[in-house]
Image: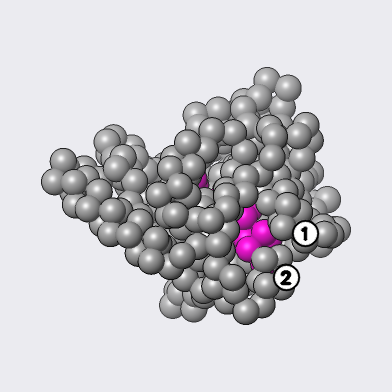
């Protein structure tokens, strides 16, 4: 049996597919299970023993020059030829909604059968549950298992002094309405340190805010580090996805907005306080870990107060 899972979206989407992959491995222990994904998200699958092979392609929008995009197309053609030689039995398309690109990959791979997550996103269902519909079509029953993420070796960093809980603060978010103000992160950190001796690791998307390809939050991180200068905090630049995974693995809990870092923390088993703006919290909430979701009626995280965030952390810490 040769199974190909095609998941070409973002990091969170890919991690939400790992319960499906785990169920496939348990149902077909001797199968070749390949996962086709993009080069940006692929490091999230490193070390996953449920997967026989990770097949990687580059998205054109991640490449700056025409020459680089043409070379990527050549490599993609070679990848498709390689898949055809594999003689795939089943290609699985676990994403809901528009899957035209994944459909093309599945067709070009020559898969004997294509299994799609049926229908549209069911109201109130999580992305893990929607992806897992592919498993039921292959006769796999039961609830989805936990997500799988193997953390690389912990980075060689000096952790903040003290014995309080180590809290990860990730300040970046792709969508503007998901961005909690830096000043509130600073005030929240002051309160949590005063209450529990909390220590902090600071994470953000690296790069300048005006970078046309990969805009980042170096400026915001520098500002927050300055506002937290009297607290036990270590700013941890993470230029590679593996570095972010390793850094988050050190934390006792994480506070962040909805996004890839949130799903990474959840897959690592970290309790979470998460801010949701104009995204579907039922579909994208942390899977399988204690968490508190804060989503204001305005669907703008700037309307979440420091007191609300502090109360959510207190409740989470008591439960955890």
Element on which disc 1 rests? loop
Q: Quadrant of residue 215?
A: top left
Question: Which quadrant is home to the C terminus?
Answer: bottom right
Residue at (46, 65) in percent of width and height: 87
Q: Is residue 85 left or right of residue 117?
A: left
Other residues around mark 1 within 10 Å, as few (<14) / some (14–19) / many (≥20) = few
Residue at (48, 44) in percent of width and height: 102
Question: For residue 27, which numbered disc appears in the image?
Answer: 2
Q: Is residue 4 magenta?
A: no
Question: Which quadrant is home to the N terminus?
Answer: bottom right
Viewer-proximal residue among 250 and 10? 10
Q: Quadrant of residue 2?
A: bottom right
Magenta span: chief secondary structure: helix
Residue 132, can we see it?
no
Q: Which residue is mark 1?
A: 139
Total numbered labels? 2
Viewer-proximal residue among 278 and 228? 278
For residue 88, above or below residue 69: below
């Amino acid at each position: 049996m040769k199974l190909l899972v095609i998941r070409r979206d973002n990091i969170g989407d890919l991690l939400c597919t790992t319960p499906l992959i785990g169920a496939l491995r348990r149902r077909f222990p001797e199968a070749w299970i390949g996962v086709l994904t993009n080069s940006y998200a692929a490091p999230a699958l490193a070390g996953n023993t449920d997967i026989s092979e990770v097949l990687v392609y580059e998205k054109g929008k991640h490449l700056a020059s025409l020459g680089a995009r043409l070379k990527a197309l050549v490599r993609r053609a070679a990848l498709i030829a390689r898949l055809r030689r594999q003689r795939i039995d089943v290609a699985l398309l676990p994403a809901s909604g528009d899957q035209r690109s994944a459909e093309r990959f599945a067709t070009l791979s020559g898969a004997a059968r294509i299994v799609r997550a049926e229908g549209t996103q069911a109201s109130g269902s999580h992305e893990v549950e929607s992806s897992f519909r592919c498993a039921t079509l292959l006769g796999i029953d039961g609830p989805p298992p936990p997500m799988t993420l193997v953390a690389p070796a912990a980075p060689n960093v000096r952790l903040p002094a003290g014995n309080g809980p180590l809290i990860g603060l990730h300040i970046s978010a792709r969508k503007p309405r998901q961005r909690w103000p830096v000043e509130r992160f600073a005030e929240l950190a002051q309160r949590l340190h005063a209450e529990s001796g909390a220590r902090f690791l600071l994470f953000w998307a690296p790069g300048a805010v005006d970078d046309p390809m990969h805009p980042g939050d170096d400026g915001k991180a520098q500002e927050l580090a300055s506002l937290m200068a009297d607290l036990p905090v270590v700013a941890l630049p993470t230029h590679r996805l593996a570095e972010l995974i390793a850094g988050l693995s050190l934390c006792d809990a994480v506070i962040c907005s909805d996004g890839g870092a949130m799903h990474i923390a959840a897959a690592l088993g970290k309790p979470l306080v998460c801010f949701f703006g104009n995204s579907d919290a039922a579909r994208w909430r942390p899977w399988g870990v204690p968490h508190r979701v804060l989503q204001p009626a305005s669907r703008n995280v700037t309307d979440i107060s420091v007191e609300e965030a502090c109360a959510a952390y207190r409740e989470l810490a008591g439960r955890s």
